[in-house]
């Protein structure tokens, strides 16, 4: 059995969410994956502003002491829709800076998670 690569992060009290974008090739698919993987609230409007609002919402927002968001499988989306991916990265980066009530760290995985 393979150990969870995030055991140490979880042991320090951080919440870990994995956003797997494998097979996503458009904004609608990206927003659907975000809604499911991040367990976003019902009011999530599936647009960039709504995603930014959700990520910064203290009711969803980063757990204490923090939340690690690991984005995997993003390369095909980046190739299919580079402008959308740039916007997605900007939204994620802004959320990591503002972070609501706790810390939010966003990591773009370059390969498969062990």
Image (spheres, rainbow, N blue to C red):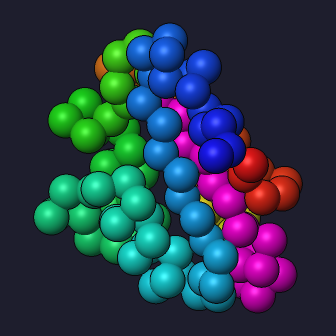
- Please state if 101 lies on the left or on the right of 28 as rendered: left
Q: Which residue is drawn at 61% across and 82% down?
A: 24
Q: Please say whether residue 71 is one of the residues in the magenta stretch.
A: yes
Q: In which quarter of the image is residue 100?
A: top left
Q: Please tell me how many numbered marks the rendered image carries.
A: 0
From the top left corner, tell me how far across and down residue 67 is, in percent: 46, 30
Is residue 29 positioned above or below 101 on the image?
A: below
Task: Tell me where the magenta segment starts and ends, as one range.
Answer: 67-82
Q: Please say whether residue 38 is one of the residues in the magenta stretch.
A: no
Is residue 110 positioned above or below 13 on the image?
A: below
Residue 109 in view:
yes
Is residue 78 positioned above or below 13 on the image?
A: below
Q: Quadrant of residue 65?
A: top left
Q: Residue at x 67, y 44 (%)?
A: 2
Q: Nearer the viewer, residue 26 or 48?
A: 26
Is residue 26 positioned above or below 82 on the image?
A: below
From the top left corner, tell me how far across and down residue 80 is, in percent: 76, 87
Q: Which residue is drawn at 58% across and 65% down?
A: 20
Residue 103 in view:
no
Q: Nearer the viewer, residue 62 or 87?
A: 62
- Please state if 4 lies on the left or on the right of 113 as rendered: left
- Please state if 85 lies on the left or on the right of 27 as rendered: right
Residue lying farthest left? 42
From the top left corner, tell me how far across and down residue 43 is, in percent: 16, 63
From the top left corner, tell me how far across and down residue 106 is, in percent: 62, 39
Q: Residue at x 65, y 37 (%)?
A: 3
Q: Which of 2 and 7 is in front in this view?
A: 2
């Amino acid at each position: 059995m393979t150990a969870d690569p995030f055991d140490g992060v979880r042991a320090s009290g951080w919440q870990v969410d994995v956003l797997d974008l494998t097979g996503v090739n458009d904004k609608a698919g990206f927003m659907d994956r975000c809604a499911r993987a991040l367990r976003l609230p019902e009011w999530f409007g599936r647009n960039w502003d709504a995603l930014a609002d959700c990520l910064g919402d203290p009711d969803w927002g980063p757990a204490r002491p923090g939340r690690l968001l690991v984005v995997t499988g993003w390369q095909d989306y980046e190739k299919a829709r580079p402008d959308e991916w740039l916007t997605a990265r900007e939204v994620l980066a802004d959320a990591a800076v503002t972070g609501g009530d706790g810390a939010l760290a966003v990591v773009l995985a370059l390969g498969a998670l062990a």
